[in-house]
Amino acid sequence: EWKQLNEKRNELINTTIEDLKSTLDLTVYKPRTENDEKDPPHLLPVVVGVQGRTWYSGSVRDGMQCYLSTALSLGYAAVMGERRVGQQGWRGRHMVHDVKELIQWVVNSGKENGLDPSRIVVMGGGGSGAHLALTASYQLNEELQRKAVAVVIARHGATNLVDAWQTPQKRFWNEREAIENITGQALFGEGQETEEDAASAQAGYEYLSPVHHAAHNHGHIPPTVILHCRQDEYYNFDVHAATFADILSNNKVPHLLIDPFLHSHGCDVGSTAPFQLIHYVFTRVLISVKLDAFDLEVEGENESNRPTDGIREVQSSEKNAMEL
């Protein structure tokens, strides 16, 4: 797929973001078209890909190739960047910082590189990529007091570190230990001798929890698409997806939750039915953002309005270009 991605791109930009805390290498892929030399230059909408896999390790190549190839086919530029990882001793706050810097580069330097900073879609790779894409996008929009990120798409990742620490997954991995590693501390117990210690731990967990930022929405949380399988053995569906969707609904954040009932973590890898569905949604979202026609509206909160065929929440209107 990366060979295909390189064949489709017209221009490859390699650059480095430097600040006091980190140095990030990023790559920008631009699509190749038949009329490259004839068409006047124009700003391209952007998909920012956040590398997935675990918080400890990962690569920009993990699980994003097909989606970014589709983005190039639709006339998008694809921006990918490395981030710091837990293997090197970094914490979640450093990873969020890196992803925010990646998006901020598009916001600040996009135009001079042929990118449209008003049409940014952020997509997180499986697991940690989804968690960091959500957290960074929500925080950045709040900091800028506007929707710099137009839409964020998250594929089976963590959203609720507070509840997950208290009811962690244990069968295939130690979720509590993983959370303590990226936060740098336990939520309760050892190290929480004073009220100040406990408050600091709570704040650290909330900082890295998209559900917390969604619950304190001030009108800048972007429309959100979530893929989270019901049988996910790494990130419990009820903890990380159902609660998240309810909070988004309660705070009037347009969103779509795709929840294949009989599938497990990573269900969109390969030519599976969940992949076909999320790829279709991804394509429609990109087309809608490109045409400035993306318009999700929150329907009523009545449970009877929720479909049960694998899409738990579909907020749309007749004029919604997605029309799922």
Image: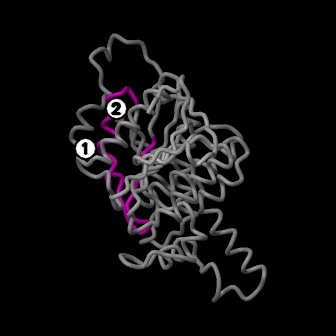
Identify the element where label 1 is drawn. Answer: helix
Please check the rendered image and state whether residue 130 is part of the magenta-colored stretch, yes or no. Answer: no
241, 69: nearer the viewer: 241
Please check the rendered image and state whether residue 58 is part of the magenta-colored stretch, yes or no. Answer: yes
Q: x%, y% of residue 208?
A: 59, 63
Quarter of the image containing the C terminus? top left
Report how far apart the C-alphas of labels 2 and 1 lie in the structure: 12 Å
Q: Is residue 86 above or below residue 40?
A: below
Identify the element where label 2 is drawn. Answer: helix
Q: Is residue 103 visible?
A: no
Q: Is residue 175 above or below residue 50?
A: below
Q: Which mark is residue 72?
A: 2
Horizontal arrangement in the rendering, residue 19 relative to residue 227 (left or right): right
212, 272: nearer the viewer: 272
Horizontal arrangement in the rendering, residue 64 relative to residue 225 (left or right): left
Horizontal arrangement in the rendering, residue 170 relative to residue 62 (left or right): right
| Residue shown at 57% from the left, 72% from the top | 183
Q: Which residues are magenta?
A: 48-76
Mark 2 or mark 1, which has the lower sequence index?
Answer: 1
Q: Residues within 10 Å of mark 1 (few under 14, many from 20)?
A: few
Q: x%, y% of residue 118?
A: 57, 30
| Residue shown at 42% from the left, 79% from the top | 170
Q: Is residue 144 above or below residue 21?
A: above
Kind of residue at badge 1: Trp
54, 25: nearer the viewer: 54
For mark 1, what is the residue?
2
Q: Contact, CB < 8 Å: mark 2 with mark 1?
A: no
Q: Is residue 228 visible?
A: yes
